Amino acid sequence: MTNKTTKAIFLDRDGTIIWDKNYLASTNDIEYYPDTLSALKLMIQKGYKLYIITNQSGVGRGYFSLDTVHEIHRAIDLDLLSHGLPVFSGWGICPHAPDQNCDCRKPAPKLILDFMQKDKIEARGSWMVGDKVIDAECGLKAAIQGALVRETSLSQNKDYPFFKTLLEFAQSLPE
């Protein structure tokens, strides 16, 4: 029996797999980027477990409830299933406002580290991908690789690999 390592991609939600709607509070407002499903499928085909790591400060600010966040995540999982894709292996959610000084808000690595320990994820070959520098920083703080996607103003940041789309990132991954 071979001892195959488990590698993962931790993805930011808003601005990475779905359009950032500035405090998304309704399943009716979920809108995927055109390449999202193709990118997720390719990552899965290349042997990665997929997780979402998301700051949802709208909960801490009182704009919507944690139940609303879970409802949105259930809707996204159902969308994946309807396209023949598995649901995400985990949803890491920081529900705190920035001024609450929690230990789970990106760029803090707690949510990633918890999944890595629980699911025996190998750091080597794993990634944190998002549209903001705090996403890539979170990856580095968790001792995995960090990458930026989509936000063209970030393409000038030489500290992290930049990809125009999530699909471009997925295509760059080794088998």
Image (spheres, rainbow, N blue to C red):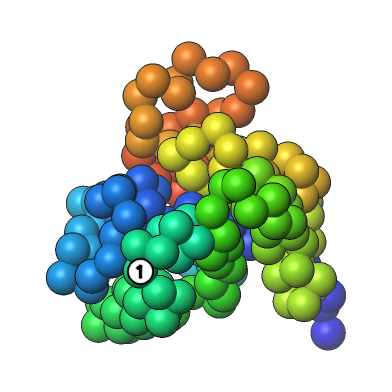
> In the image, residue 127 lies at what x, y percent?
63, 49
**Badge 1 density bin: few <14, some 14–19, many ≥20, Cα 10 Å:** some
Q: In this view, does 1 lie to the left or right of 59?
A: right
The answer to whether 139 is drawn above or below residue 26 in the figure is: above
Q: Is residue 127 visible?
A: no
Q: Quick one: 42 or 142, which is closer to the camera?
A: 142
Q: Quick one: 58 or 28, which is closer to the camera?
A: 58
Q: Quick one: 40 or 100, which is closer to the camera?
A: 100
> In the image, residue 118 lies at what x, y percent?
77, 77
The answer to whether 102 is drawn above or below residue 86 in the figure is: above
Please state, as top left, top right, bottom left or bottom right, where the C terminus lies in the image: bottom right
The answer to whether 53 is drawn above or below residue 129 in the figure is: below
Which residue appears at 18% of the width and 63% of the height?
29
Please state, as top left, top right, bottom left or bottom right, where the N terminus lies in the image: bottom right
Q: Mark 1 points at which residue?
A: 64
Q: Is residue 12 left or right of residue 7?
A: left
How many marks the image carries: the answer is: 1
Q: Quick one: 92 or 152, which is closer to the camera?
A: 92
Which residue appears at 76% of the width and 43% of the height?
141
Instruction: Look at the numbered disc 1 and give the secondary structure of its residue.
Output: loop
Which residue appears at 49% of the width and 36% of the height?
132
- Furthest residue in direction left, as rendered: 28
The answer to whether 157 is drawn above or below residue 172 in the figure is: above
Q: In this view, does 70 lie to the left or right of 110?
A: left
Which residue appears at 53% of the width and 72% of the height?
91
What amino acid is found at the position of numbered circle 1 in the picture? Phe
Q: Is residue 117 left or right of residue 48?
A: right
> In the image, residue 15 lies at what x, y percent?
36, 46
> In the image, residue 114 lies at what x, y percent?
75, 68
Q: In terms of image quadrants, where is residue 65?
A: bottom left
